[in-house]
């Protein structure tokens, strides 16, 4: 057999040797092939080296050695010719075995599943106009500015809309997906920060009516600007109303946070500055700074809370105080865009603490594991929670 012209056979024999199915004759062929190389050192210098001509076997068409431009010194590599050739064939034999047994696909698929990169959320949102057109907002921008005549990013870059669309007659919906957050400056000067998986709807008459009325789903932090308008013959301060389903928060110049996700037990309104009136049905309560109103069905309860915890997400943190694992994992799932699966009994442990939302999910989960009450396993984009 001419080994130099039939390297495929050598590869197949190497594959059989790995499986333990090579015949005595094939083992003899392999050993003669191995003995055909001189046990000598081979120096490979810079640039491209034709491995076929030097090694006398068509294992590779070329062996490319790169020298970094930042390291101008000449680099050379000393190898043993026989060992290189034999190792190369064994590597190819292993690859051939993986291919034949379909193990390579399984290996790559499993590796891919394990190595799905789960990164923190970022500025990401969609703006939907009344005509049904959706604008995917740029992720490298800090936020959106809406006024009565134009749409633009906070750095002044304009957003093109059809010429026949007048913004002061547009209903708009700004929404964030899982793993997304966005800021928006409204036509009246109010600022809104949307958390992940949230949306805010502005009616077509937002800029011109006496009442400023928006609809919220999810979670948002508001800094409401004072605004006056001529109404019934005199200048009056315009109320700012936020509707969450059949619940309403009425505002007169204030900073507050509303959390209203479907899995939450009611709607939480936390006041940082000013005054708000929270209502559901025919019931209303006024809360003061440092207080939180919880609306469940037709009931309104108030309590004094740590306002920093309520707005930690806006400041780039997770902050929990005596929360159960389902609550904690809901926040994590929305921010990292993952699914949460509970395996076995769910821990009754309560969790507290602060950690940056900019950290990899592995670090966040590791912090929770330090309690000893819970453990995690990541499979693809699923986080499995275990006792």
Image (spheres, rainbow, N blue to C red):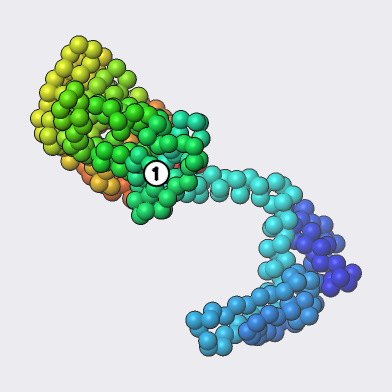
Quadrant the N terminus occupies: bottom right
Q: Residues within 10 Å of mark 1 (few under 14, many from 20)?
A: some
User: Residue 54 falls in which quadrant of the image?
Assistant: bottom right
Residue 34, relative to residue 234: is it above or below?
A: below
Of the pair 91 and 67, the residue shown nearer to us: 67
Percent x, y for residue 16? 76, 56
Residue 40, relative to residue 104: is it above or below?
A: below
Could you tell me how many numbered marks the image carries? 1
Mark 1, residue position: 150
User: Residue 325 falls in which quadrant of the image?
Assistant: top left
Q: Secondary structure at mark 1?
A: loop
Percent x, y for residue 277? 16, 24
Q: Residue furthest bottom?
A: 73
Residue at image location 20% in from the left, 14% down from the top:
299
Residue 8 lies left or right of residue 274; in this view the side is: right
Residue at image location 72% in from the left, 51% down from the top:
99
Quadrant the C terminus occupies: top left
Q: Is residue 173 visible?
A: no
Residue 357, relative to residue 54: is it above or below?
A: above
Residue at image location 59% in from the left, 85% down from the top:
76
User: Residue 44 falls in which quadrant of the image?
Assistant: bottom right
Percent x, y for residue 238? 20, 30
Q: Is residue 171 visible?
A: yes
């Amino acid at each position: 057999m001419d080994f130099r012209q039939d390297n495929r056979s050598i590869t197949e024999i190497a594959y059989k040797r790995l499986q333990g199915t090579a015949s005595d004759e094939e083992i003899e062929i392999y050993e003669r092939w191995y003995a055909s190389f001189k046990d000598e050192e081979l120096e490979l210098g810079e640039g491209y080296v034709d491995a076929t001509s030097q090694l006398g076997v068509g294992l590779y068409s070329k062996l490319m050695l790169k020298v970094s431009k930042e390291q101008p010194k000449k680099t050379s590599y000393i190898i043993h010719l026989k060992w290189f050739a034999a190792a190369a064939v064994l590597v190819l034999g292993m690859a051939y075995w993986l291919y034949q047994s379909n193990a390579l696909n399984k290996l790559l698929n499993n590796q891919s599943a394990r190595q799905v990169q789960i990164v923190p959320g970022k500025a990401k949102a969609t703006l939907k106009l009344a005509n049904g057109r959706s604008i995917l907002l740029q992720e490298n921008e800090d936020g959106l500015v809406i006024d009565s005549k134009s749409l633009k990013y906070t750095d002044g870059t304009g957003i093109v809309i059809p010429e026949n669309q007048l913004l002061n007659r547009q209903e708009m919906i700004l929404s964030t997906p899982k793993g997304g957050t966005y800021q928006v400056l409204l036509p009246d000067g109010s600022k809104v920060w949307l958390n992940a998986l949230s949306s805010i709807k502005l009616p077509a008459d937002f800029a011109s009516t006496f009442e400023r009325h928006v609809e919220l789903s999810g979670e948002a932090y508001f800094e409401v600007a004072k605004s006056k308008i001529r109404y019934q013959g005199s200048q009056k301060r315009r109320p700012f109303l936020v509707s969450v389903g059949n619940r309403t928060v009425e505002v007169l110049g204030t900073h507050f946070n509303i959390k209203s996700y479907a899995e939450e037990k009611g709607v939480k309104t936390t006041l940082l500055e000013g005054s708000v009136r929270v209502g559901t049905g025919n019931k209303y309560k006024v809360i003061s700074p440092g207080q939180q109103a919880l609306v469940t069905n037709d009931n309104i309860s108030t309590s004094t809370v740590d306002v920093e915890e309520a707005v930690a997400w806006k400041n780039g943190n997770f902050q929990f105080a005596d929360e159960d694992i389902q609550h904690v994992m809901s926040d994590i799932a929305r921010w990292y865009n993952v699914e949460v699966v509970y395996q076995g009994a769910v821990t009754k442990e309560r969790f507290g603490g602060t950690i940056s939302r900019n950290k990899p999910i592995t670090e966040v989960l590791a912090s929770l594991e330090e309690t000893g009450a819970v453990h995690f396993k990541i499979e693809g984009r699923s986080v499995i929670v275990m006792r």
